[in-house]
Every structure is written in structure tokens, then in C-alpha cells.
Image (cartoon, rainbow, N blue to C red):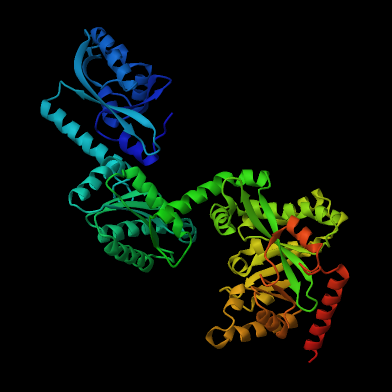
Amino acid sequence: MYKFPEDMKKAYESSPLSFVYYQNIDHKGEPVLVSGGFAQNTGLSNDDALAWIKRGMFERMHPDDVGIVSQISDDFLHQRGPYDIVFRVRIDSVDDGNEVPPQYVQMHGLGKWQTMPDGTELAVITYSNLSTTREVTIDKIKEYKMFQKDRFYTDPLTKLPNINYLHEFGEEKINTVRAEKRTPHIIYTNISAMQSYNNNYGFDEGNRLLCLAAETLKAQFPKALLTRYSDDHFVAITRVDENELVQRLNESNQIVQRDAFGNTSGLRFGVAPIDEYMDLGEALDHAKHAIRHIENDMNRSVEFFSPEVEEAYWNSRYILENIEQALEEHRIKVYYHGLYRIENRKIAAFEGLARWIDPNRGMISPGEFIPTLLRYHLLYKLDLYMFEEVCREVKIRHEKGLPLVPVSVNFSRQDFDHADILDEMNRIYDEYGMDQYVDKSYFIVEITEQDLATGEDNLHEQLRRIRENGYKLWLDDFGSGYSAINMFSQFEFDLIKYDMELMRHLDDNGGVNRLILKELVYVAGKLGIHTLIEGVETEDQLMFVKEIGCELAQGFFFHKPQSLEEILFRVKDASKIKICETPEDREVMNQKLIREVFSKQTM
């Protein structure tokens, strides 16, 4: 049975107007709430009046009226007809202690259906005593309609119209703008990171932020139909042209960020033009698709719907709807990318990269499915799957005679919020009997500098445990924009991978990246941390990497990522792919690093 929100329940039960709410339960009209006015007319409390109605009003109804009221009530309950009827109700009275013959008063019942905030359909019937004067009755009906309008169409916090108002009058607003020979636009607004704001500053400040956003948007779009849609979302329908629209939205964002009590990321807007064949629902969907396209890009606050946005949305939908099946049926393959030792030109390790081979779409780019899985907090499933696939293929590599060099797997900061990654890695390691082939140092966890810099204590603790458990830990994409040298003093890494953008722009601005990479490699070497530079594509770049003393290189200069089948084929022909390091080779190289570190420290 429907339960009214507490504030609404109190308001209705204290209303002087006479009405009752009913719900259709098992084809029977069950009363769920009576107003104060109705209870007063019966001479009972609200609870007693509700109990009396549940027993049935027919016991007090004139026998001649029961049949017709019953029929009209049934038609109304099943929405086959209106509820608008006059009937007689008995009023029991006592005179000097003696019962007097029953007296009947004429009652007018007028019903309507109302959609509640959660979508539940309730019937509300107003009861008017026709023995009162016509003027009083009309005044009470007007008062009730205004009361209903205010409660049903208005958001109590911001005082803006609410979602009910949007659905009732949105199409009318769209048609009004079209009649002016202008293109209506719908704006879907979101307060970014609202939950975080509430956590940091409390719900009272969160409510003030909602009101600030409402007031700001109302001031910027005074002629728009502006509604609080739900939670921290607002929807507006406006006639403002596109260029001016962007300016006003950016100003709104700036005002909210400036005037908010606490630090806020501000507002995000998805905008969609509404063409002549589009209804409100479709337009709203387009605006929602547009705002999802912004993601967490702090440099953008406004996104317009476009065919590209729509395509991106449906691509994301396809990924979300098919990821589970892709994992179950091994449609996502491990592609191995060699990491080469500069000194001996041998493969020192592989990086395992995810490639989705879809039966309908062919190769789905990781640039598509990884951001989508990250956005919807599903990336941990892929990353653990990749680790499991690498383990599963160790046995195949061993049986085919492929040297078992270490393999790295990428993990995201988000993964550690959804699973105990170390427990899962150990479970998979044991399940596939890896100790028959390799120890845990064979497996490398890669975590990006960005994730580490923005991660919390839980992430840092799990990474520490992973390394203590025997797995290797590599810092990926160092130099991608979050670089901080003090990271070396806070965490222990086995290797640092320098971001490929440093190599791609090696000679920009007078070759400043050459100096930066040289110093970074030197510092890491002095700390006893192995080094690798990504993005090596030419012989000249390879020579530079060698000159500055970097141990490893990765890039298309050597080869592109390949499946296990391709790797097996190429390894058989040493002219096509360089041979892999043996464990003895790796130990020699590690001992050499130790000697060099000792030498630098004693200089």
C-alpha cells in the first residue's frame, strides 16, 4: 500500500478540506488517507475516520443510492468512467437521550486520478456537503484545487515547478516557442559531484546549493519553463538561441561556483534542439545523452546533442549490454606488447592489452569500451579477467616452448573500491596452478600516476600488500600531467614507465623533454628503480633512450601488440621478432643495476 512522504502526509491530514485518497488493490478501492476536513465532518479522528471508510461507507448510505454509487465507484476504480455523483448519507443524532429517526444529507463526490512522485496512481475524491451554502461549497472546491496544484506541481525546496509540471505543460511550452518561429531548446542540468558536496559540507549546505542553482538558472532564463526534475537535476525549455544559450549557461556555472558555500565543480549542461517532429520525451533523452558525453571533463560544462553524441551513447549501450557475454565467451583477447631491453635487444617482459573481437562489430577499440566500463564502475571485471587470461595462457606458453617472461596487467584505482584485488589475484594464481610454472614476481601490476595521485589510503594499502605478496608494481604514464617527484618517497615501485607523450614531443620547445627525461631516468636509477620509456617509434628515439641510460623501451618501432597465436608464430622465426630474455639474463641485468646504484651512491 502506498505510503505518503511524511511532509505531504502531515499537510493532507491537517487540511480543512474534505477529501479521501484511495488505491486500487486487487480491484478494490482501499482508502489510504483522509484529510482533516473529512475527519471533522464525520466527528472522528483521522485514524478512526480511515478505519470507518475501510469498513465501508455503504452502511451509512441511503439504501436507494447504494446500487448506483457502487456501479459508478467500480467504473471509476477501473478508469472506465468519471466519479461525479450526489448521494445521501445518514447522520445519526440523539435528542434528550432518545434516538430520533435518521436524517440524511446530500453529499457530492467528485473524483480524479493523481500520479504520485514515485509514479503510483491514486484516486482522490472530494466530498462536499450540499446542505451548506453554494458559495461555501464553491470556495472550498477552489481552495482544494489551489492546494492540490501547489503540492502536486511545486518543488517544496526550490519553489520551482517540479517533474509533474514539466510533463503536464512541457509540450505546451514547446509549441508556444514554435509558434514564435523559433527553435526551442531543452536543457538538462546536473550539479556535478553533489554527493561529495553533501558529504563534505552537510545536507543543509547541499540544499542551499540546490536553491542557489535554481535561483541562478531562473535569473539567467526568466522566460523559460524551468523545473526541478529530480534530486540535483533541473530541466528547462527555452527559446534562447544557441550562441546566447552557451554564454548564459557558462555564466550560470561561474556564478554557482563563485557563490557556493563550499568548493563545487559547478554545473554541467546537456542541450538538445527540439525539431518540429520531436516530442518532449525524445528531446529530454537527447539532452541526457549529451550531458553524459561530458563525463568528468573539467574543461567543459556544456554539450549539445549531435549525431556523434547519439552514436557514442548507443556504442556505450552496446558495450554495457554485451560485456558480460564477451567475458564469458572469451571475446576479449590478451594482446601482448613487448618491452625490450636496450642493452641486449631482447624482450624483457610483455604488457597484456585488452582487445575486444566482437562477432557483430569486429574489433571494438579499447578507447571505446574502457572509458565506458570505467564510467559505470565495471572496469574491475575486465582487469581481473585480463589477469585470469594471462594466467590461463601461461600454461599454453609453457607447453608451446615460449620463454616465460613477465607480463604486466593494467589496474585502475576504481578496481580497488569494488574488490580486494590481492585476494582475487591470489585466488586466480592458485586456481590455475601458477606455482608449477612461475612465481608471483612473473606478474606485474601497472597503476597510472594519475590514479595513484588521486587515490586514497585504501588504494595505497592494497598496493603495498600486493608488492609485499611477491607481485611486481610498476608506475605507469609518469609525466602525463600529475607528476610529483615526492611520489618516490611515498611509495615503492619496481619500475617507472615514462609517458609516451614525452617521447612524441621530444624536440618541442627546444628539446626540453630530452632534458626532463634524462634527469628523471637518472633520479630513478639512483633510487634503484628500473626505467622504461613508452612510444619509441624510430631508430633515433631508440638511440636517445640508450644515451640517457634508460633500461627498457616499448613502442611500434619493435612491433605492434599481438595475440598469443601471433606471438608464437613470430617467436619461431627469430628474424621476425627478437628473442626473449631467460631468467638468467634477467638476473644479470638486475645485478648490474644494483652495482650501478651503489656506484652512484658512493660518488
> Residue sitting at 26 percent across and 30 percent down?
37
Quarter of the picture holding the C terminus: bottom right
Residue 99, x across and y down, in percent? 24, 9
Q: Judge by depth and name the residue closer to the eye, 536 or 11.
A: 536
Residue 413, x across and y down, in percent? 62, 61
- Does residue 101 sit above or below 173 in this rendering? above
Q: Judge by depth and name the residue closer to the eye, 124 or 56.
A: 124
Q: Is residue 364 left or right of residue 211?
A: right
Q: Is residue 74 left or right of residue 450?
A: left
- Does residue 488 sit above or below 69 in this rendering? below
Q: Quadrant of residue 308?
A: bottom left
Q: Judge by depth and name the residue closer to the eye, 540 or 143.
A: 540
> Residue sitting at 78 percent across and 88 percent down?
600
* Residue 324 in sight: yes
* Residue 202 in sight: no
Residue 384, x across and y down, in percent? 69, 53
Outermost bottom residue: 603
Q: Quadrant of residue 33?
A: top left
Q: Quadrant of residue 416?
A: bottom right
Residue 127, x across and y down, in percent? 24, 24
Q: Judge by depth and name the residue closer to the eye, 469 or 22.
A: 469
Quarter of the picture holding the N terminus: top left
